[in-house]
Amino acid sequence: MNDNTHKPTSIVIVGGGTAGWMAASLLQQHWAYCRISLIESQDIATIGVGEGSTPYMRHFFKQLAIPESEWMPACSASYKCGISFPNWSTKEGFESYFHPFYSNFDLKTGEAFFHNVGLRRRGSDVPAHPDDFWLASELARTQRAPITRDKMPFEPDYAYHFDSGLLGDFLKRRAIDRGIVHIVDTVEHIEQRSDGGIKALMTQSGGKLSAELFLDCSGFAALLINKTLKTPFQSYQHSLFNDRAVAIASPLDNSQAMPSETVSAALSCGWAWKIPLTTRYGNGYVYSSKYLTEEQAEQELRGHIGAGAQGMEARHLKMRVGRSEQHWVKNTLAVGLSQGFIEPLEATALMLVQYTVERFIKDYAGPDTPAQVLSEFNGAINNNFDGIRDYIIAHYKLNSRSDSAYWIDNRNNPIHSERLQTIFDSWDKGEDFEATLSQYKGEISYLRPSWYCILAGMGRFPSALRPPSASTQVAPADQARRYCQNTAERFHDHRAYLLSTYGEQWPRGSGSN
């Protein structure tokens, strides 16, 4: 982190929730001497649905020295090997695919996959479905935890599922125990400095909160960054149609093994998540209000869940999809929903929170931080948002469904970046795809395996394929599958490993099979 001589002496964070308390925890860890206050209103509820993460979140807990055995039981957490995407494609043999987290276990089979994909892109009928080549796909298929039973030279990458409300509560208790000042009040007025920066917050109870730095974690309200500092907001609505979600919890079926994957299933006008926690399933439907009403969306989601949704409350959410044009403005940093939001298809929301705060800690050099540093910081955050946006758009552009106007309109929507179009064109023309991805290094957010998996997993190949010539070297998919199957046997059963991790904290009624 940055060793500049000036560090802040006081910070006020506006808003709690997972983003606010993650930010507070990171700032406290790196600037332990700083007075940090967090104000949140008891009148404003947090989102608090079941949520998934990317592997980047493991680094968050390692920084704070919080072991999995401490935080996971407190947050109904389980392990995540990746995400499955059923029903996005109608192409035979490619109706579903799995987006894995990859590691050194996949070095040989991954290269075999890339090789076969290259052949199929150029018209050869060879096996090139990603599910055959990645260990994480097999771990998820067999409901295993991404933890080995015996010592191995390396471990796979993995992420988590958790109740985001409980995670916020866990981090809140921990931060308060370590000296963060918690204020339950409502901000009523914001006093600005002569240069436009934030000077102080006036609260409903008559209190005044002054600080050197302010963090806007006020959610979609964006109280400081947009409403006060008037920072423009760049909407993604023309390329990402979804602006609503409905969430319904459902009970676990304890006669079944514990899944270790997120399921993101395409429905009529959007997609439904299914996230396995140790106490329940988190379910939700992300959709566009242009194509579906709240009532229709709830009815479709209940039908998708089945009997488990009977009698369960539905929570309807509105989403502001896009990003602020700047995230660090004068003495204010926007974090979480206030800075922007991309629908949770690839579970990137908390990754962006973490990256934003870590980068800020690294770059901050006091009130006189050079304008160039702020510009580079905001450019880096925007690159992350826009790179993730492009990858999410790719899911919709690659869909091959024709059962509703929603899917057809998404596929035919011409509004997307030139960068994404270049990636599609390079793939379709059989060009050097590695060179194309390298051209955008640092801009596309996702690495080589992710782009190969989504394009191949959706079946984006020539419709007319020919048998490979006798001289063509084809990587045997059956050998890759056997390797993944044999290697997966060295990993723990997911439920069994969670039981051992939770110990006496295992939730009652969750079963032990």
Image (cartoon, rainbow, N blue to C red):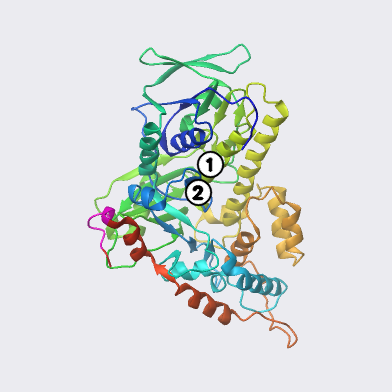
Q: Compared to 81, does 190 lie above or below? A: above
- Please name the residue shown 40% across and 14% down the image: 207
Q: Residues within 10 Å of mark 1 (few under 14, many from 20)?
A: many
Give the structural element (helix, strand or loop) at label 2: helix
Residue kind at label 1, given as amino acid type: Gln
Q: Main secondary structure of the magenta part?
A: loop
* Stretch in magenta: 504-511
Q: Are marks 2 and 1 in contact (CB under 8 Å)?
A: yes
Viewer-closest of 466 and 342 = 342
Residue lying furthest bottom in this view? 470
- Please count the marks in the image: 2
Locate residue 261, reporting x and y percent.
44, 61
Q: Which quarter of the figure has residue 44?
A: top left
| Residue of label 1 | 354
Q: Which quarter of the figure has residue 230?
A: top right
Residue 57's disc is 2
Residue 506 among those drawn in magenta: yes
Viewer-closest of 458 and 173 = 173
